[in-house]
Image (spheres, rainbow, N blue to C red):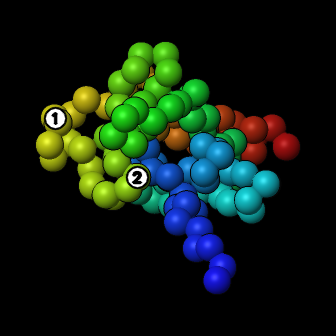
Amino acid sequence: MAAIDSTPATVEINDAIFCTHLKEQCTDCDFDGREENDSFYGYDSIDRAPIECPASTTNKDGVYQCKKHGSAGLYHPVTAICTRLTRGCAGCNQCYGWKKQISRAIVAAKKNRGKN
């Protein structure tokens, strides 16, 4: 009998999605989460540089946290429950502040578009 792969195709960290390599756009697994992340944060999708997920680990509960500050990314990959419901908003907004990063990437893409 073949083993069933229970690894999720994507990882959600503080409301943004990434591939299992923690990349917003990944050629290894043919993944591009830019459109979905743009849409979630209320932006029209644009061809922009992908946001960078900082070095992250999972804690004993399986919750992603940044290595720099040790703060959680608010999402438990096994139970698929936002930990804000039980732990308060403890996400590392310095590292997982995706809306600001996406906004900057969109502005940069629009500037570069005007130069071509």
Percent across and percent down for residue 40 are 41, 56
Dot 2 and dot 1 residues touching (CB under 8 Å)? no
Whether residue 41 is visible: no
Which of 4 and 29 lies nearest the eye of the viewer? 4
Q: Farthest residue toward the front?
A: 1
According to the picture, the residue beneath numbered tag 1 turns out to be: 88
Give me the residue at 24% from left, 44% from top. Answer: 83
Whether residue 112 is visible: yes
Give me the residue at 68% from left, 51% from top. Answer: 25
Image: 83 above or below 40: above
> Mark 2 vs mark 1: which is more N-terminal?
2
Give me the residue at 75% from left, 38% from top. Answer: 112
Q: Amino acid at mark 1?
A: Gly
Marks 2 and 1, how far apart at CA: 17 Å
Q: Amino acid at mark 2?
A: Pro
Is 3 positioned to the left or the right of 93 in the image? right
Where disc 1 sits, the SS reads loop
Q: Farthest residue toward the top?
A: 68
Give me the residue at 52% from left, 40% from top. Answer: 102
The quadrant of the rendering that contains the C terminus is top right
Where disc 2 sits, the SS reads loop
Percent across and percent down for residue 23 are 64, 45
Image: 5 above or below 58: below
| 2 or 1: mark nearer the eye | 2
Percent across and percent down for residue 19 are 61, 53
According to the picture, the residue beneath numbered tag 2 turns out to be: 77
Image: 107 above or below 78: above
